[in-house]
């Protein structure tokens, strides 16, 4: 992608997602994800209804008037965006690829964190760690993350969520808010998720396309597996083929939901042609 086109695309995503984070998400994000504790802010005169346990007796004695200590939330947090950039993310049937929605969601979360003065880091993964950007603050840092989400070309097209979670656990020693954004067409990540969830506040955001849920009856069709690169001739006219495909797909989705729930992690499902804004707001409010 030429630099001019890339900057134009970055700017377009910034305008859309920053407006969402400014007016909708930043408040909900702040409420949903608490800081590490309370820190001393100031001392002020006692007011009717204040907790007497908050009285600062030294200041009270000095001024001969009751004063209380005021504490505020120690806010600074770290957000880690773990984004699946494997081959299956390039699928789309409604004039939009899954990776486009994934980029918008990640950008919206990043700007929401920035509004709350939190750090944001990025892990792009396939069946390996493709890119790691350590957590940092600021608009220019968020714009770099968006640029990478748009133009980064993965070395592999396969998926391994377990590897990504292992990397998260090894690099993030302190508690972080973690959003794993993927279609979750993967398996065997239950153990690593359980370990990572003990330390971090993890949410899985599944982005999917309506055409993935059911195989249409189109007769004999040549199909490309975006992750393996293999092409196969599939008889979509066969009822048993369609049933087996749906069974396989729903087993993967059931595994995602149950694995995240058992680990105490959050779950969000959003379809490419649905409003991810509505889904994310609903999730934040339910926390």
Image (spheres, rainbow, N blue to C red):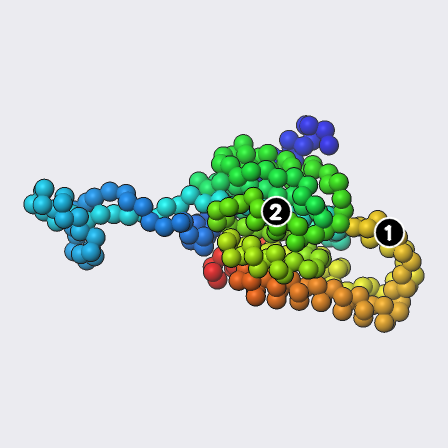
Label 1 packing within 10 angstroms: few (<14), some (14-19), many (20+): few
Tell me what residue is drawn at x 67 percent, y 32 percent: 6
> Up-down: is 254 above or below 72?
below
The image quadrant of residue 77 is: top left
Labels 2 and 1 touching (C-beta < 8 A): no
Most distant residue in the left direction: 64
State whether residue 62 appears in this view: yes
Tell me what residue is drawn at x 65 percent, y 54 percent: 162
Q: Earlier in the sequence, mark 2 or mark 1?
A: 2
Q: Nearer the viewer, residue 46 or 161?
A: 161
Total labels: the figure holds: 2
- Quadrant (top left/top right/bottom left/bottom right) for the N terminus: top right
Residue 59 x, y percent position in the rendering: 14, 43
Residue 280 x, y percent position in the rendering: 54, 55
State whether residue 107 appears in this view: no
Q: Which mark is residue 196?
A: none
Q: Nearer the viewer, residue 272 or 226?
A: 226
Label 2 packing within 10 angstroms: few (<14), some (14-19), many (20+): some
The image quadrant of residue 107 is: top right
Tell me what residue is drawn at x 42 percent, y 43 percent: 76
Q: Which residue is mark 1?
A: 230
> Up-down: is 278 above or below 128?
below
Residue 186 x, y percent position in the rendering: 71, 57
> Up-down: is 235 above or below 129?
below
Q: Secondary structure at mark 1?
A: loop
Residue 106 x, y percent position in the rendering: 59, 46
Q: Nearer the viewer, residue 141 or 1?
A: 141
The image quadrant of residue 49 is: bottom left
Q: Which residue is mark 2?
A: 167
């Amino acid at each position: 992608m030429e630099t001019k086109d890339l900057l134009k695309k970055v700017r377009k995503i910034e305008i859309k997602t920053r407006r969402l984070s400014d007016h909708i998400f930043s408040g909900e994000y702040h409420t949903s994800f608490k800081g590490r504790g309370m820190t001393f802010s100031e001392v002020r005169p006692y007011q009717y209804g204040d907790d007497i346990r908050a009285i600062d007796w030294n200041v009270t004695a000095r001024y001969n008037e009751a004063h209380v200590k005021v504490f505020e939330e120690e806010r600074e947090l770290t957000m880690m965006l773990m984004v699946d950039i494997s081959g299956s993310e390039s699928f789309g049937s409604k004039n939009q690829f899954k990776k486009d929605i994934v980029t918008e969601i990640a950008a919206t979360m990043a700007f929401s964190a920035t509004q709350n003065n939190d750090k944001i880091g990025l892990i792009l993964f396939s069946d390996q760690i493709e890119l790691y950007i350590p957590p940092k603050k600021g608009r220019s840092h968020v714009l770099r993350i968006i640029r990478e989400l748009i133009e980064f070309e993965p070395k592999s097209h396969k998926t391994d969520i377990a590897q990504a979670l292992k990397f998260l656990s090894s690099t993030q020693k302190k508690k972080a808010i973690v959003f794993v954004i993927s279609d979750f067409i993967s398996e065997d990540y239950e153990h690593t998720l359980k370990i990572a969830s003990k330390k971090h506040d993890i949410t899985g955001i599944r982005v999917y396309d309506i055409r993935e849920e059911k195989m249409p009856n189109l007769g004999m069709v040549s199909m490309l597996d975006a992750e393996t690169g293999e092409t196969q001739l599939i008889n979509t006219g066969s009822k048993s083929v369609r049933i087996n495909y749906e069974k396989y797909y729903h087993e993967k989705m059931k595994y995602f939901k149950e694995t995240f729930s058992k680990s105490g992690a959050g779950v969000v499902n959003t379809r490419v042609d649905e409003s991810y804004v509505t889904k994310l707001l609903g999730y934040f409010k339910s926390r």
